[in-house]
Image: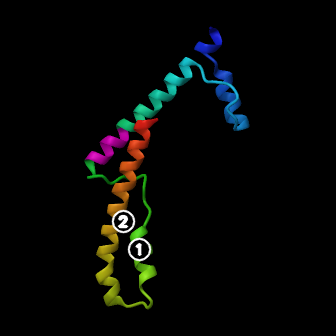
């Protein structure tokens, strides 16, 4: 019963070896659940404040797509495509943040 309720060695062994041979105890599972709830609360608050955008995701797929499309460097074309690249970045970031939030909910 004691190993089922509180088993900190399982967590230490898992981190050291990378294998999960022993099961976490009840207390460790509660701690993990608390960590996920805290992450969810902070992420939800951040996404609501910034209209789906988050500081944790800062990739630039829009710039990459525009660079792949353009065969030559033109200031005029670049000035037209820069706002579009930013819009693509924001849309992809919203999708990634929504998926990230949903994955935390599943955990």
Per the image, is 16 magenta? no
- Residue at 44%, 80% (x, y): give it: 67
Q: Identify the main secondary structure in magenta.
A: helix
In the displayed structure, would residue 84 be above or below residue 13? below
Residue range (magenta): 42-48
- Residue at 41%, 32% (x, y): give it: 37
The mark found on residue 89 in the picture is 2
Whole-percent x, y for residue 30 in the image: 49, 22
- The residue that mark 1 highlights is 63
Specify the quadrant of the image occupied by residue 18. top right
Specify the quadrant of the image occupied by residue 4. top right
Circle 1: element type: helix
- Residue at 39%, 43% (x, y): give it: 102
- Residue at 34%, 68% (x, y): give it: 88
Circles 1 and 2 in contact, beta carbons < 8 Å: yes
CA–CA distance in space, label 1 to label 2 = 8 Å
């Amino acid at each position: 019963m004691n190993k089922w309720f509180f088993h900190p060695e399982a967590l230490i062994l898992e981190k050291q070896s990378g294998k999960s041979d022993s099961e976490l105890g009840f207390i460790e599972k509660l701690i993990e659940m608390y960590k996920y709830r805290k992450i969810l609360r902070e992420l939800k608050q951040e996404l609501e404040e910034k209209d789906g955008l988050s500081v944790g995701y800062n990739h630039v797929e829009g710039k990459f797509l525009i660079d792949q499309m353009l065969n030559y460097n033109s200031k005029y074309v670049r000035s037209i495509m820069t706002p579009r690249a930013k819009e693509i970045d924001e849309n992809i970031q919203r999708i990634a943040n929504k998926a990230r939030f949903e994955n935390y909910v599943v955990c």
